[in-house]
Image (cartoon, rainbow, N blue to C red):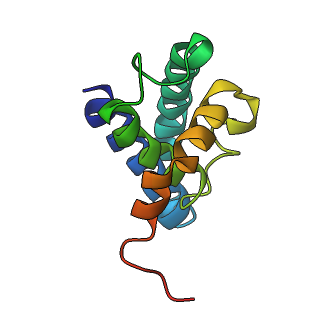
């Protein structure tokens, strides 16, 4: 529920306002609101991952669902600087662990990308 109710929607909204609409809108309050909430959510993840490798006891659907949202926030949307991603320790390490899994690597290639 944390991913579906918070991480996914908020990171997606921040991404929209940052990458696609941020320069076109004079009123930066929506982007700033989503930035602040995304920072808070990353802080929740950072705290959760401080003493564990995965969001639950083992790698689970919680990680699978959340990895993509965090990856897109810092990759596709290029909002890492906006949310102070570099200040985090545990979230980047978790993202790296998750993305390194063979099944995740395989899934990232579907559909196959042109060479």
Q: Is residue 108 above or below residue 17?
A: below
Taking 28 as reference, is 58 left or right? left
Q: Residue at x 37, y 41 (%)?
A: 64
- Say which of 37 and 2 sits in front: 2
Residue 27 in view in this figure: no
Residue 31 in view in this figure: yes
Q: Residue at x 54, y 38 (%)?
A: 35
Residue 24 image offset from top left, x and y in percent: 52, 67
**Count of numbered circles in the view:** 0
Q: Residue at x 59, y 57 (%)?
A: 75
| Quarter-of-image position of residue 39 | top right
Residue 42 image offset from top left, x and y in percent: 54, 28
Taking 90 as reference, is 76 left or right? left
Q: Residue furthest bottom?
A: 115
Q: Residue furthest right?
A: 87
| Quarter-of-image position of residue 91 | top right
For the C terminus, the image quarter is bottom right
- Say which of 65 and 53 sits in front: 53
For the N terminus, the image quarter is top left
Q: Residue furthest front?
A: 102
- Say which of 41 and 27 sits in front: 41
Q: Is residue 97 above or below residue 53?
A: below
Residue 79 image offset from top left, x and y in percent: 61, 50
Q: Residue at x 61, y 14 (%)?
A: 50
Residue 55 image offset from top left, x and y in percent: 44, 23
């Amino acid at each position: 529920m944390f991913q579906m109710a918070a991480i996914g929607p908020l990171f997606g909204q921040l991404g929209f306002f940052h990458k696609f609409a941020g320069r076109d809108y004079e009123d930066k309050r929506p982007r700033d609101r989503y930035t602040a909430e995304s920072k808070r959510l990353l802080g929740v993840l950072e705290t959760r991952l401080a003493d564990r490798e995965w969001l639950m006891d083992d790698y689970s659907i919680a990680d699978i669902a959340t990895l993509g949202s965090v990856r897109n926030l810092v990759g596709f949307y290029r909002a890492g600087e906006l949310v102070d991603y570099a200040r985090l320790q545990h979230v980047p390490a978790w993202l790296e662990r998750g993305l390194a899994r063979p099944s995740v690597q395989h899934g990232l290639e579907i559909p196959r990308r042109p060479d």
